[in-house]
Amino acid sequence: MATSAPRAGDLSATLQLLRDGRPRTRAELATLSGQARSTVAMRVDQLLSSGLVAPTGEAASTGGRPPATFAFNPAARVVLAVDLGATHARVAVTDLAATVLAEHLEVVAIAEGPEVVLDLVARVAHDLLARTGRSASELVGVGVGLPGPVDHETGRPTNPPIMPGWDGADVAGRLQELLGPAPVPVPVLVDNDVNVMALGEHAAEFRDVDHLLFVKVATGIGAGIISDGGIRRGAQGAAGDLGHVAVPGGPAVVCRCGNTGCLEAVASGRAVAAELAAHGLAASTSTEAVALVRAGDLTATAAVREAGRRLGSVLAVCVSMLNPSVIVIGGSLAEAGEHLLAGIREVVYRRSLPLATQHLRIVTSRTGGRAGVLGASTMAIEHVLAGETLDALI
Amino acid sequence: MATSAPRAGDLSATLQLLRDGRPRTRAELATLSGQARSTVAMRVDQLLSSGLVAPTGEAASTGGRPPATFAFNPAARVVLAVDLGATHARVAVTDLAATVLAEHLEVVAIAEGPEVVLDLVARVAHDLLARTGRSASELVGVGVGLPGPVDHETGRPTNPPIMPGWDGADVAGRLQELLGPAPVPVPVLVDNDVNVMALGEHAAEFRDVDHLLFVKVATGIGAGIISDGGIRRGAQGAAGDLGHVAVPGGPAVVCRCGNTGCLEAVASGRAVAAELAAHGLAASTSTEAVALVRAGDLTATAAVREAGRRLGSVLAVCVSMLNPSVIVIGGSLAEAGEHLLAGIREVVYRRSLPLATQHLRIVTSRTGGRAGVLGASTMAIEHVLAGETLDALI
């Protein structure tokens, strides 16, 4: 009778117990998992032979031969992390703990279309693998963030407004072709850039927080939602798409979407830059607006703070709705730092319930420009090391 | 070696496979679970002896003795479902499929405090158990919805505004005392009424929907969020507390919380009634406002529709944020039906992204007054039949 056949996911469960990096003995793993020692011994052998788990030495003996200890070995394989923005491609090779081994930033317009951009990504990927001395066969997963709505199940963009030529494109399939040939196509996970940044910030800086909102304030505005420890994408993957909600009490500026008073029309980097330009200041982008703030320009400082208040009046609704512990503000306008945060905090703390703001922290991104690649790496690793997909690696 | 010791949760996993009510053979369960037949046979025996699974007959034979089939037996035990509102207590005894076996509605002010109200609940519970011919020993769980914020982990209310005397009250402990004596105290799950209503509506009417928002519009306004199939409570259990968010474009009415323009101050049943009273109409409650709408009063109809628009402008933010498939409107003002929905739909469809509203349905509650007890029952059943807690029943 096949009593020894492991259930799908059992290997992954054993590996999860080792992912904190602490060396453990077979006996400790048996106790932690509640499984029989013979079962645990078999799984440890499989994980050892794959290299995903490595021997770390011996535990203190309680008499007799000291038992061997093992730990997760994140260097065993690599993943590719791809962060595509409106005008950049940031590509990284990381280990299985999302530690960046090599990365490259290239200026490229997403509007060049999927052929050009994905070709570039694949070329950079091969270069980075060569630089780190890893072969394509060691690549076990790819994570990609795109600047538009994505159907996460299929990895295809859905009517992305700033990505001509990408609607419905098979991003995963194309990357598999370009990164191949492999006996089994490497899994490619695709999501929108803000969800990926939320994952990256959460994994790198707020692993102990179960409820986090990541808000990107750049040319556009969007949010990634972590709730009960997981990313929440909603029914069509459109969750967090805050750019075109109406700002309570905001000015009735006409938005490029046709509505008036949209958040993006009154609080994005583009909106702030337009306001400053109207005052005769030299600003046409978020970055230039931020440079004026950093130079101490009072008009720019006041405009960024007011943009913060407008963001705050929408985020107050999000706080009442989702009750997060942390709101992380990222994107280029976040580089204006405390001036933007001060405006946000002013309104969020005034307009939210005391119970929801009691322990709420509102901070700027700590991962900065790396949130995207860290999140893309994390997304790929979690997929690869979870459940049945792990069996393919062993 | 203890190779036969089941892991915590294994019994539950076997039971989950049977919860759809379809009869299955041991061989089918082994295939579905990927477990050894000997293991499955042992677990089926345990479940049969507990009564949670019952024999249903024999499958078609493929030669030899036809194999026996088994199915989940929801009648094996009962749970108690308690829905407490500002002025009512609805108590039900249900089976393990959340089917109501007996229920009772009593008018009681929550402001009487926990001693009076929970004593009443316990007395009604004993009556209902007697009426259904079940003993207290068959009671395996209790679910309670309370009209205020609740720390779901401890089951204690947290500064509930309309529940004097309840702050920090040990609702679970007191009910365990009153419903005892039992060798093991029965698990009591407590949550706020809107989360419980969302669970009830979801379980009874929208089981195939993973993203649902339940909005209660009564004296107050609140929402329960189902995302990726689970209720999302947020960091302090305050998620969905929409009553005091600012309404974009709404009138600057002063709210009892001290802020101006809160949703509750301009779109609740109380707010609509106050508006109608100011027009000289006889309305002081949601129910009276709804009665005027039903009688065809044009002022009342217009006021309810305008309340719908104000709700819609906040719900549009929620739609962009959470991208639900279904919004269910419940609570007493929802009984105004299409007039309220029309106002909500008008603004949500105008102010949300096409991707998020493409497949969005906005409907009134189908469970009506029963959403609370159905949800309380579901909350208790899911807890009792999940994971390790099941072992205590066997």
Image: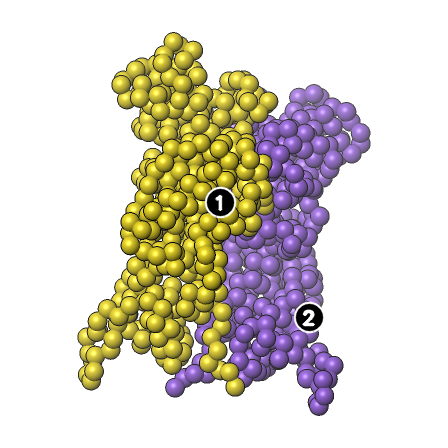
Chain colours: A yellow, B purple
Task: Answer left or right for A341 relative to B62.
Answer: left
Is residue A82 shown left or right of residue B23? left
A392 relative position to B107: left or right: left
Q: Chain of mark 2?
A: B
The residue at the point 50 percent across, 22 percent down is: A265
Please tell me the numbered disc located at residue A191.
Answer: 1
Residue found at the very far top of the displayed protein:
A280
Disc 1: host chain: A
Give the crowd class for mark 1: few <14, some 14-19, many >=20 residues within 10 Å.
many
Q: Position of residue B4 (x, y in %)?
A: 46, 83
Closer to the camera in the image, A119 or A317: A119
What residue would you read off at disc 2?
A: B22
Q: Name the quadrant of the N terminus of chain B.
A: bottom left
Place of residue A284 in the rendered image (x, y in percent of width and height, measured from the top left) = 40, 18
Query: Looking at the image, can residue B170 be seen?
Result: no
Dot 2 crowding, Cα within 10 Å, few <14, some 14–19, many 20+: few
Q: Nearer the viewer, residue A1 or B172?
A: A1
